[in-house]
Image (tube, rainbow, N blue to C red):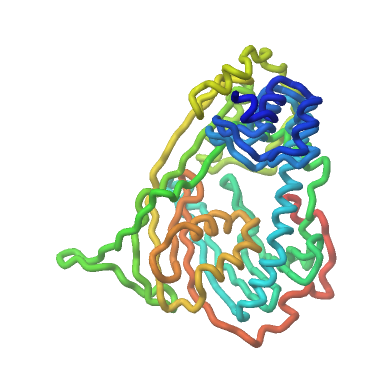
Amino acid sequence: MASEQYPLHAAVFEGDIRRVAQLLRTHDLSEKDIHGNTPLHLAVMLGRKECVHLLLAHNAPVKIKNAQGWTPLAEAISYGNRQTVLSVLRKLKQQAREALEERRPALVQALREIDDFCLELKWDFHSWVPLVSRILPSDICKIYKKGACIRLDTTLVDFNDMHWDRGDISFIFNGDQQPQSSLTVLDNRLGVYQRIRYEESDLELEEEVDILMSSDIIAAQMSTKNITFSRAQSGWLFREDKTEMVGDFKADFYYVNGLILESRKRREHLSPEDVQKNKALMENIGRGTWDATQQQVERRQSLTPPEPCSVIWEEYIQAEPGRPPCLGRPLVAKESAKAFKATVAMSDDFPMTVGMLLDVLEVVAPFKQFQKLRDFMMSRLPPGFPVRIEIPVFPTVTAKVTFTSFEWRDDLGPELFVIPEDYREDSSRFPDL
């Protein structure tokens, strides 16, 4: 019997809250049924508010996808109950913090085991859209590492949704301090600093819910499971493998084949007015005329619940695996897959290993420029160190990352990793951090 195989799932499906309360103490809350759904997936799809509350109270995992690639948060947005979306989002943030804290001791220890160094890398953003390409930024980042401390100097404050800010900015991570005070951002032009907050305020969470409930539900990932590498060629008459100097390093160039951006969008929770607004927003972004500072999001109310589900547990669990019947709001979805060209230059001369750099990027990955770089470098790479990587970061935008110089340093002063005495604290300088 399927109900015996997935008793907690069955109890949630049928809304038997007493049975759920009994079973969740002895069952794995991350277990997936034949459709890839966890008990929390089913609870939000079916609008079982009491079950959702109980499962979240027992730390049911939120960052987990079903067979269709959707998380419980995505399904909560589709159902449209604002309080459920808020509760699931809050638990997602909490679990992310807890996961980071679990990794923190090993991360700090890994930093200590790496010799101190200074690293310089250059970002160039470009696009096949002519107007967008002319206004995209470039940046040179310098990363200093001493003991368990990291400093990153950059002029590109933020780059997100085709909007960027310039400045003279430093991020300082101190692994010896408590999490709440370990990461600080300095505005060197204004002489101010802001400690990056460890936890979002209730108002910030409410505003994020407004954005989620008024936007497409998007599941996008860069698929690297089928990628292969082939040597790039140079020359006209006599073709040969391409080898060039990249900064201080001799490097072999490779084409990256089979890099696919898979994207799925859902909008069954959106009104026709929402769809029109979002379409206009994307058109403005494409023309480079969008001003993020003028973007306002209205407070969203809960949607009218979908029709009560008429599917019974036996019908659900006996459906073809991965193809369950609709349990909530009828799906309005669009899927796309786009192949991207990418290149990578690998050097045996670079003194750092990819594993070492990943430990460093673990600290700076929360900053948007570095997340996809880290994701790409975790995939299979040819021998050596990737001193130049050219990868897509948005459907129309490609980033070229070049490691221009590196040197081991045992003379880095501690003043690089502390807040200057004449800087004043300004907790509102970087509202998104």
Q: Name, please, the residue furthest toward the bottom.
A: 411
In front of the other: 271 or 381: 381
Left or right: where 301 falls relative to 371: right
Left or right: where 23 falls relative to 132: right
Residue 239 figure quarter? bottom left
Q: Position of residue 3 (x, y in %)?
A: 64, 24
Residue 171 figure quarter? bottom right
| Res. 294 in view | no
Residue sitting at 45 percent across and 70 percent down? 385
Residue sitting at 73 percent across and 32 percent down? 85
Q: Name, please, the residue furthest toward the left.
A: 237
In front of the other: 233 or 306: 306
Q: Position of residue 48 (x, y in %)?
A: 74, 24
Residue sitting at 67 percent across and 67 percent down? 106
- Figure check: 146 above or below 81: below
- For the N terminus, the image quarter is top right
- Figure check: 382 above or below 295: below
| Res. 109 in view | yes
How many marks overall?
Answer: 0
Residue sitting at 58 percent across and 20 percent down? 316
- Figure check: 172 above or below 400: below
In front of the other: 360 or 272: 360
Left or right: where 160 falls relative to 49: left
Residue 101 figure quarter? bottom right
Left or right: where 183 falls relative to 337: right
Q: Position of residue 213 (x, y in %)?
A: 68, 30
